[in-house]
Image (tube, grey):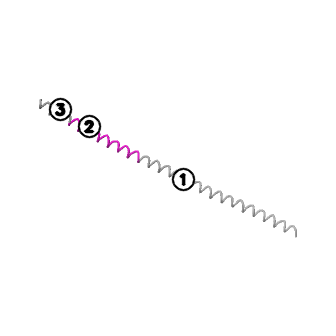
Amino acid sequence: MKKIMMLATALLFSVAIVSAQDTKQNAKETAHQAKETTKAAGRKVGRAADKAGDKISDAAKNTKEDVKEGTNKTLNKADRKMKKAERKMDNSK
């Protein structure tokens, strides 16, 4: 009877140890998955930031070109009006 009790106790301890090792392995795998998920999220944020930066850069470039174009149009219009006024003055002499 004593041997059966010792055997049952040993069996119980071995089951507990196997269960603890399984739990430890599951925890390691879960931690690894969490790490990979965090890395992937970081990469995704980085890509989104790059895209946003590119869009801002393009918008700034377009704005610069629009301002330049508008300024040139205004200067050309003013130049044409000045030439027209000069012609009127020359014709009135």
Amino acid found under the numbered disc labelled 1 = Asp
Foreground: disc 3 or disc 1: 3
Residue 67, relative to residue 21: is it above or below? below
Decide: few, some or many residues near mark 3? Use Cα within 10 Å; few <14, some 14-19, many ≥20: few
Rendered image quadrant of residue 17: top left
Asked whether 78 falls inside the magenta stretch, the response is no
Q: Nearer the viewer, residue 17 or 79?
A: 17
Amino acid found under the numbered disc labelled 2 = Ser
Q: From the image, tell me which residue sits under label 3.
A: 8
Give the SS element for disc 1: helix
Per the rendered image, the range of residues in magenta is 13-38
Where does residue 6 sit, x and y in percent of width and height? 14, 34
Amino acid found under the numbered disc labelled 3 = Ala
Q: Earlier in the sequence, mark 2 or mark 3?
A: 3
Give the SS element for disc 2: helix
Q: From the image, tell me which residue sits under label 2.
A: 19
Decide: few, some or many residues near mark 1? Use Cα within 10 Å; few <14, some 14-19, many ≥20: few
Residue 8 left/right relative to 89: left
Foreground: disc 2 or disc 3: 3
Residue farthest along the bottom direction in this orientation: 93
Residue 62 left/right relative to 21: right
Q: Nearer the viewer, residue 25 or 71?
A: 25
Q: From the image, tell me which residue sits under label 1.
A: 54
**Separation (CA) of disc 2 from disc 3:** 16 Å
The residue shown at (12%, 31%) is: 3
Asked whether 29 falls inside the magenta stretch, the response is yes
| Main SS class of the magenta portion in the image | helix
Quadrant assignment for the C terminus: bottom right
